[in-house]
Image (spheres, rainbow, N blue to C red):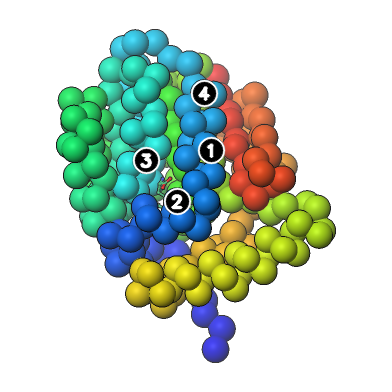
Amino acid sequence: MTERLNKSKENVSSMFDSIAPKYDFLNHFLSMGIDKRWRKKVRKLLAYKKDAVILDVATGTGDLAIELHKNKPLRVVGIDISEKMVEVGKAKVIAKKLDNVIDLQTGDSLDIKFDANTFDAVTCAFGVRNFENLEKGLSEIFRVLKTNSKIVVLEFSKPNNKVFGGIYKFYFTKILPFVGRMISKNDFAYKYLPMSVDKFPYGKEFLDILQKVGFCETKTKKLAAGIASIYCGVKK
Ligand SMILES: C[S@@+](CC[C@H](N)C(=O)[O-])C[C@H]1O[C@@H](n2cnc3c(N)ncnc32)[C@H](O)[C@@H]1O
């Protein structure tokens, strides 16, 4: 049976609710820790003032929000539609005594409950691919950013080397869903991951969408031979 990619808010939030307790372990295990380095690269692309307020959308269990605090902003707000992911994230933030800087909340990136021109930067790691409506989500990010401020998106893409791409595809579509299912006990979540990457725009196609919603100075950088990419844009 072929499963359909259902990105409704209800489907995505219940899928992440169900894997939340195992999400961090699987993330670091299945990526062999490389995801931590990628989040660090996102942080290094952001230079902001000491009184900066940063928004991390689709924050999940808050790993990027926690990484971003190292640049010493005034505040990092993280929003996510999955209550359970946010719960895990909040516990980590409290354990690290960062709850005076990092504020994780449930919230939808397609309908951000903040005023226009609020944030000095907006980030999103492995989140935009799950949006039910990508342009709506990016437009919302554009709206809440202050003028001259930056969006930085980290997302899976596809390797362009055929040999490496073939090996990676085997890992991503066969091994990862198997291990993911065994550990998370969720049948679908780790099948959804390669399916959602396969259908998702990357490289120039993603930059075109950033420009379409209003971003200027758009740039992309491939990570790990194209397994993931970082995208930047500025609201002018
Ligand atoms: C793969 S996880 C990434 C979490 C985190 N950013 C990280 O780097 O580990 C994707 C997250 O996107 C969230 N998400 C998907 N659609 C969303 C939306 N419309 N608004 C807010 N969060 C959303 C999911 O609930 C999930 O926690």
Please name the residue that numbered disc 4 is placed on.
44
Please name the residue that numbered disc 1 is placed on.
38
Look at the image and tell me in which quarter the C terminus lies.
top right
Which residue is at the far right? Answer: 162
Q: Are marks 3 and 4 in contact (CB under 8 Å)?
A: no
Q: Does the closest atom of ligand 1 sit within 8 Å of the Cβ of label 2?
A: no
Q: Are marks 1 and 3 in contact (CB under 8 Å)?
A: no
Circle 2: residue type: His
Q: Does the closest atom of ligand 1 sit within 8 Å of the Cβ of label 3?
A: yes
Please name the residue that numbered disc 2 is placed on.
28
Q: Secondary structure beneath disc 4?
A: helix
Q: Secondary structure beneath disc 1?
A: helix
Q: What's the CA distance linking mark 3 and mark 4?
A: 15 Å
Circle 4: residue type: Lys
Residue at screen point 26% across, 45% down: 89
Please name the residue that numbered disc 3 is placed on.
63
Q: Is 52 situated above or below 3?
A: above
Residue at screen point 48% across, 36% down: 39
Please identify the quarter of the rendering in which residue 45 is found.
Answer: top right
Residue 157 versus residue 35: which sits nearer the camera? 35
Q: Secondary structure beneath disc 2?
A: helix
Q: Are marks 1 and 2 in contact (CB under 8 Å)?
A: no
**Disc nearer the start of the sequence (1/4):** 1
Q: Could you classify mark 3 by the number of other residues whose Cα lies within 10 Å: few (under 14), some (14-19), or many (20 or more)?
A: some
Circle 3: residue type: Asp
**Disc nearer the start of the sequence (2/4):** 2
Q: Is residue 64 visible?
A: yes
